Amino acid sequence: MTGPLLFGGIPSEAFFLQPDALVAFGMLGGALLVGALAVHLIDRWRKRDAKAEHTPDEDLTNFRAMFERGELTEAEYDKVRKRAAERMKQKLGVAPPAAAPTLPPEPPAPEAG
């Protein structure tokens, strides 16, 4: 017994074996692979640009503009500015200044007289 007929008399079992169908499926599969490759490459390119490292001075410039537009409060801007300064010092390899040693208070001078 044969299955239902497709496309004007071709039995459904034999349809996938026809050369025209094989070429069509091959082209469809190839187009899907090319499309997937294009999506992968575009996604990789997009993520690479997003990972581009900003320098602390660029970040500080952006945050300063946000502060001037009123998007950041003064306290938030000060916090960001301090963090950017710390990162800049680390990037330049500058050690934070050592705390000045505390000297004991001088004894009061003897009174003359």
Image (cartoon, rainbow, N blue to C red):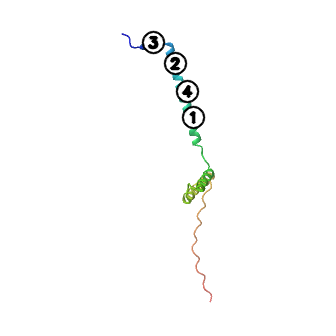
Q: Considering only order in the chain, which callout, 2 or 4, is on the residue closer to the N terminus?
A: 2
Discs 4, 2 touching: Cβ within 8 Å: no
3D distance between C-alphas at marks 3 and 4:
32 Å
User: Residue at label 3?
Assistant: 8
User: Residue at label 2?
Assistant: 24
Q: Secondary structure at mark 4?
A: helix
Q: What is the x, y in percent for residue 87?
A: 59, 53
User: Residue at label 1?
Assistant: 42
3D distance between C-alphas at marks 1 and 3:
43 Å
Discs 1, 4 touching: Cβ within 8 Å: no
Does residue 28 sit above or below 42 in this rendering?
above
Q: Secondary structure at mark 2?
A: helix
Q: Secondary structure at mark 1?
A: helix
Q: What is the x, y in percent for residue 20?
A: 51, 14
Q: Amino acid at mark 1?
A: Ile
* Front label number (2 vs 3): 3
Q: What is the x, y in percent for residue 7?
A: 46, 14
Q: Amino acid at mark 4?
A: Val
Tell which of 109 and 72 is nearer to you.
Answer: 72
* Front label number (3 vs 4): 3
Discs 3, 4 touching: Cβ within 8 Å: no
Discs 2, 3 touching: Cβ within 8 Å: no
Q: What is the x, y in percent for residue 34?
A: 55, 26
Q: Kindly identify the residue that appears in the image at 53 percent across and 29 percent down.
A: 36
* Front label number (2 vs 1): 2
Does residue 33 sit above or below 50 in this rendering?
above
Q: Residues within 10 Å of mark 3 (few under 14, many from 20)?
A: few
